[in-house]
Image (cartoon, rainbow, N blue to C red):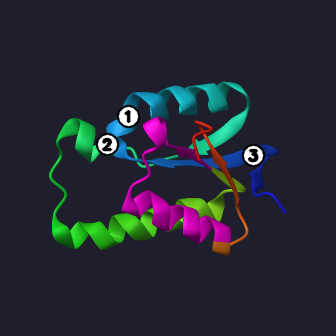
Amino acid sequence: MPQTHDNFKIITIVGSSKFKDEILELAQTLTLEGNLVLFNPLFHHSNEIAVPTEKGEMLRHMDMQRIDLSSMIIVVNKDGYIGTDTRNEILYANTTGKSVKYMFNEE
């Protein structure tokens, strides 16, 4: 059953943080369509934020919790790029029965 909160569908956006512009644009579009949108707001590749090694596991766990809260994920796969962390998120979504859609039909 889709996860909802007060009748709003909850969607998690996943993808490389280097696709910051695409993620933000998609989040805005989905929000205006009446969805609750979750994503990692750090964009550490785009913003050149150094993430301490000890924080990496915590951030990966948070990514999985976002997926747990959602009915589906949308993968930002610009130019066909899907990194290791995003692949793990897709695998997790698949194993937990979440719907997986791709922003770009290059898959």
Q: Secondary structure at mark 2?
A: loop
Could you tell which of marks 3 and 2 lies nearer the N-terminus?
A: 3
Q: Which contiguous range is marked in magenta? A: 74-94
Distance of label 3 from label 2 (alpha carbons): 24 Å
- Given contact means CB atoms under 8 Å apart, are the residues at marks 1 and 2 in contact? yes
Residue carrying label 2? 43
> In the image, what residue type sits under mark 3?
Lys
Q: Residue sitting at 45 percent across and 48 percent down? A: 15
Where, by quadrant of the figure, is residue 72 drawn? Answer: bottom right
Could you tell which of marks 1 and 2 lies nearer the N-terminus?
A: 1
Residue carrying label 1? 20
> In the image, what residue type sits under mark 2?
Phe
Q: Position of residue 50 (x, y in %)?
A: 15, 52
Distance of label 1 from label 2 (alpha carbons): 6 Å
- Given contact means CB atoms under 8 Å apart, are the residues at marks 3 and 2 in contact? no
Q: Residue sitting at 67 percent across and 73 percent down? A: 96
Mark linked to residue 9: 3
Q: Position of residue 36 (x, y in %)?
A: 65, 42
Q: Is residue 80 magenta?
A: yes
- Given contact means CB atoms under 8 Å apart, are the residues at marks 1 and 3 in contact? no
Q: Position of residue 9 (x, y in %)?
A: 75, 46
Q: Name the residue nearer the viewer: 63 or 16.
A: 16
Q: Is residue 36 magenta?
A: no
Please tell me how crowded label 2 is: few (under 14), some (14-19), or many (20+) other residues with Cα within 10 Å. some
Q: Residue sitting at 79 percent across and 46 percent down? A: 6
Q: Name the residue nearer the viewer: 106 or 102.
A: 106
Q: Secondary structure at mark 3?
A: strand
Q: Position of residue 71 (x, y in %)?
A: 72, 56
